[in-house]
Amino acid sequence: MARLDGRVAIVTGGARSIGAAFAKGLAAEGAKIVIADLDAAEETLGIIKQAGGEAMAVKTDVTNESSCEEMVAKAVEAYGKLDILVANAGLWVHLERQSATEIDVDTWEKVMSVNVKGVWLSAKAAIPEMVKNEYGKIITVASTRAMKGGAGMLHYDTSKGAVIGLTRSLAREYGPSGICANIIAPGATDTEISQSLATDTQKERRVASAQARAIKRAEEPDDLVGACVHLASPESDFMSGQTLVVDGGAIVW
Ligand SMILES: NC(=O)c1ccc[n+]([C@@H]2O[C@H](COP(=O)([O-])OP(=O)(O)OC[C@H]3O[C@@H](n4cnc5c(N)ncnc54)[C@H](O)[C@@H]3O)[C@@H](O)[C@H]2O)c1
């Protein structure tokens, strides 16, 4: 028996990159997957189905409350319940590096809207289903940048700090209802899209960040899947409010 047999999981931002790795990893352990993304998820759905998994896509904008409600309603309509929410959708790769004095208010609000409000609205829509079943796993995705700090991404770093606070409070508020809420904090992770957009300076920065790790290599989306499956499975039923740093030992947390 696989570790997530009979479970139903929504992965926001699951069409590509880290979210796609989560969706494929949870499906490989037997979960039925709902990919909730603004973008088409055909490629990821195809891979899951070809491997014998069950998955569907629901076009979702996590910044929109009724879109999140529809995401959950469609998951429940198709698969009967909801056990796992991986709130992964976030703005990162397309953000320009800017100093605190250069960031404009519109960009700041856009980052907060997707990275913070989007996590809250996804959870807000998912929680009633989980409460009904007295069981649920909420997994959010922060970043080690929220712990380390860094130049050029104040909006992003702030948003990921908020994700940690939000998840800890969800853990406290809904622990009595059988819901665990935990955080994965990845280090800088190479994705197809980040690789294709990387400037020479960014490539140099990636090499430097690999050297700063205990495990001296680039981080890839698949490196994060084990933590996600663990937090989604009954193995972690007594873990809540925790932050799992998965960054090859750059931060010893
Ligand atoms: N890649 C990294 O180095 C890194 C490091 C730490 C944390 N993270 C976090 O991991 C998560 C995934 O990052 P990634 O690198 O895979 O990003 P990505 O940009 O490659 O993928 C993000 C996905 O989210 C979707 N999305 C964006 N806005 C959305 C919205 N409003 N509603 C629904 N879907 C939306 C996109 O369509 C895309 O499929 C993000 O939360 C990011 O902040 C990434």
Image (cartoon, grey):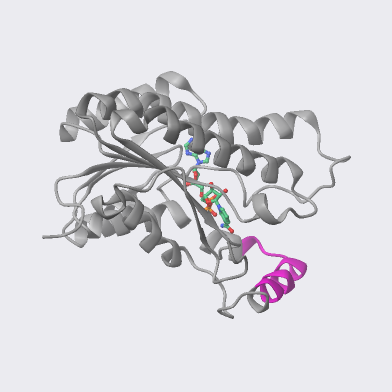
Quarter the C terminus occupies: bottom right
Q: Is residue 143 found left or right of 41 in the rendered image?
A: right
Q: Looking at the picture, how far across and down is residue 158, in whole percent?
A: 69, 40
Q: Is residue 61 found left or right of 77 in the rendered image?
A: right
Splitting the image into 4 quarters, where does residue 83 fall? top left
Farthest left residue in view: 1
Residue stretch rendered in magenta on the structure: 196-209
Which residue is drawn at the image coordinates 55% and 79% (left, top)?
Answer: 215
Secondary structure that dominates the magenta span: helix
Q: Looking at the picture, how far across and down is residue 213, in whole percent?
A: 62, 75
Mark yes or no: residue 102 visible: yes
Quarter the N terminus occupies: bottom left
The answer to which of 207 and 41 lies nearer the viewer is 207
Q: Is residue 33 found left or right of 171 in the rendered image?
A: left
Splitting the image into 4 quarters, where does residue 13 fall? top left
Which residue is drawn at the image coordinates 19% and 49% (left, top)?
Answer: 54
| Number of marks | 0
Farthest right residue in view: 101
Q: Does residue 203 belong to the magenta stretch?
A: yes
Which residue is drawn at the image coordinates 59% and 80% (left, top)?
Answer: 216
Which residue is drawn at the image coordinates 60% and 30% (left, top)?
Answer: 113
Q: Looking at the picture, how far across and down is residue 188, in whole percent?
A: 61, 62
Q: Is residue 127 above or below residue 193?
A: above
Splitting the image into 4 quarters, where does residue 29 fall? bottom left
Q: Does residue 94 belong to the magenta stretch?
A: no
Q: Is residue 102 found left or right of 158 in the rendered image?
A: right
